[in-house]
Image (cartoon, helix red, strand yellow):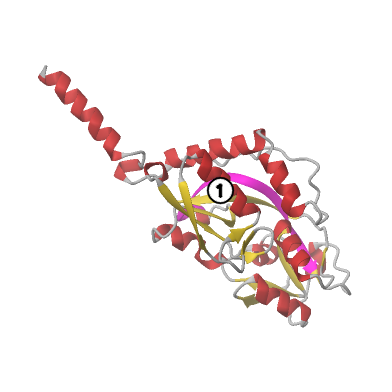
Amino acid sequence: MKRALAAVLALFATVVAGCGTDGQESVLDKDRIVIAVRPDLPSVGFRRPDGGFEGFDVDVAAYIARKLHKQASYIPVLAADRAKVLTDGKADLVLATFTIDQERKKDVLFAGPYHVSYQDILQRPDETIKNVRELKGRKICEVKGSNAAQRVVQEREVPAELVPFDDYKACLTALKSKQVDAVTTNDVILAGLANQDGTGLKLANAQFNEQRTGVGMRRGDVAGCEAVNRAITDMYQDGTTGRLLQRWFGKSGLDLSTIAVPQFEGCS
């Protein structure tokens, strides 16, 4: 009898500990979660005048929250603070054009990716930049916290000059005033920016450097990560991903003819 009671108490203790690793709270343990999204990227993550958020990433975040059976609230985050809001405990998930790379994995656990795009180049209407090699000697806007401009110089070994700015709104101003010659990052970000701007800024359609955009989570939450991956799989299989991409980028010129489930990174 005593052994049976001890086994029951041990099982109860395990359940109370939750789904986190080594006693760490998992996103699955919470009734309400906080999701950080971009406030500055039209069609991706953008803060409306009423204070709410809209865009592809925001809709994906809402879908994942529903699949996890969680109430969700949203906070804004810029590129430089995406890892920090997780490590500081201000957000449970980050869906904010957070490209997965090995350096970021030192601080953040990634679920997904939930979308695979490509890096592209945004330029003025009078420019004729066609590919990444033609950025040689050009000034490129570098958004603080984003590694897109650095990838041109480091990975592609193109000797361009990086000019730092706080956000993409400042980058567009710099581009139109000829302080910089190009803005480079995920094609969906550039498409949204160009659509909202409406002054004829254009994409080069260069399609280089695959961009694997993931869901940022606190390290150690393997169970939560696996649950998010299941939600992302459902999102592709039930057609939601295709509908959302068409809604936000269908008129942007992006190729949306093939929408395949991305290969996940794994949650370990």
Q: Position of residue 202 (x, y in %)?
A: 83, 66
Q: Residue at x 67, y 40 (%)?
A: 240
Whether residue 100 sits left or right of residue 131 in the image: it is left
Residue bearing the label numbered 1 = 62
The residue positioned farthest toward the front in the image shown: 50
Q: Quadrant of the N terminus?
A: top left
Magenta includes 115? yes
x%, y% of residue 77? 53, 64
Task: Name the image quarter holding residue 230.
Answer: top right
Magenta stretch, overall SS: strand
- In the rendered structure, which segment of residues is drawn in magenta? 105-122
Where is residue 151 shown, x and y percent of the image? 66, 62
**Picture residue at 57% right of the left edge, 53% below the top:** 101
Residue visible at 54% across and 52% down in the picture: 102
For residue 125, which quarter of the picture? bottom right
Residue 162 seen in the figure:
no
Question: Foreground: 258 or 140?
Answer: 258
Q: Against 154, is 230 above or below?
A: above
